[in-house]
């Protein structure tokens, strides 16, 4: 099962995107991908203007899992303390995915998700 609700994707800067309007049912996962994704379509696709690029630090390639940060906060007040967790996978613009998982037995609140590219 994917995200519940309608994702509102707002680009805050060329390297920061804010996603609101979604939650996760109990035991559900939702996926976020880059604009150049290949394979299965992610539940939320980031805008093409979200700038990501492979780069090297001290001669070593820095993978997307290390240079794309994800933060998730509840977007509404509630007594529900369901925590969701992001897992990053993939190494290219095409296969990179952020999988947000709710392993609890209750649905999450609405979420506020920030995706940041840092170099």
Image (cartoon, grey):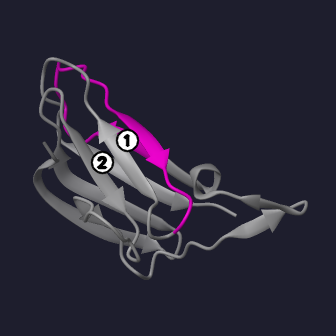
Label 1 to label 2: alpha-carbon separation: 6 Å
In the image, residue 76 sits, relative to residue 60, either above or below, namely above
Asked if residue 4 lies left or right of residue 14, the reply is left
Asked if residue 95 lies left or right of residue 69, the reply is left
Q: Is residue 83 magenta?
A: yes
Instruction: Looking at this view, name the residue that lies furthest to the front.
Output: 39
Q: Is residue 17 magenta?
A: no
Residue at image location 54% in from the left, 66% down from the top? 92
SS at badge 2:
strand
Q: Nearer the viewer, residue 5 or 64?
A: 64
Q: Magenta span covers which residues? A: 71-92
In the image, residue 48 sits, relative to residue 107, either above or below, namely below
Question: Where residue 53 sits in the image (x, y, percent)?
Answer: 62, 74
Q: Nearer the viewer, residue 20 or 55?
A: 55
Question: Where residue 116 sits in the image (x, y, percent)?
Answer: 52, 59
Question: Where residue 58 sits in the image (x, y, percent)?
Answer: 90, 60
Label drawn at residue 72: 1
In the image, residue 49 sits, relative to residue 13, either above or below, namely below
């Amino acid at each position: 099962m994917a995200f519940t609700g309608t994702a509102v994707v707002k680009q805050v800067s060329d390297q920061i995107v804010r996603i609101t309007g979604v939650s996760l049912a109990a035991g559900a996962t939702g996926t976020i991908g880059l604009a150049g994704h290949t394979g299965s379509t992610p539940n939320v696709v980031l805008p093409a203007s979200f700038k990501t690029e492979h780069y090297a630090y001290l001669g070593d390639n820095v993978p997307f899992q290390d240079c794309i940060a994800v933060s998730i906060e509840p977007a509404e007040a509630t007594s529900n303390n369901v925590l969701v967790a992001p897992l990053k996978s993939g190494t290219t613009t095409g296969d990179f995915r952020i999988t947000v998982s709710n392993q609890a037995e209750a649905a999450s609140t609405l979420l506020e998700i920030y995706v940041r590219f840092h170099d």
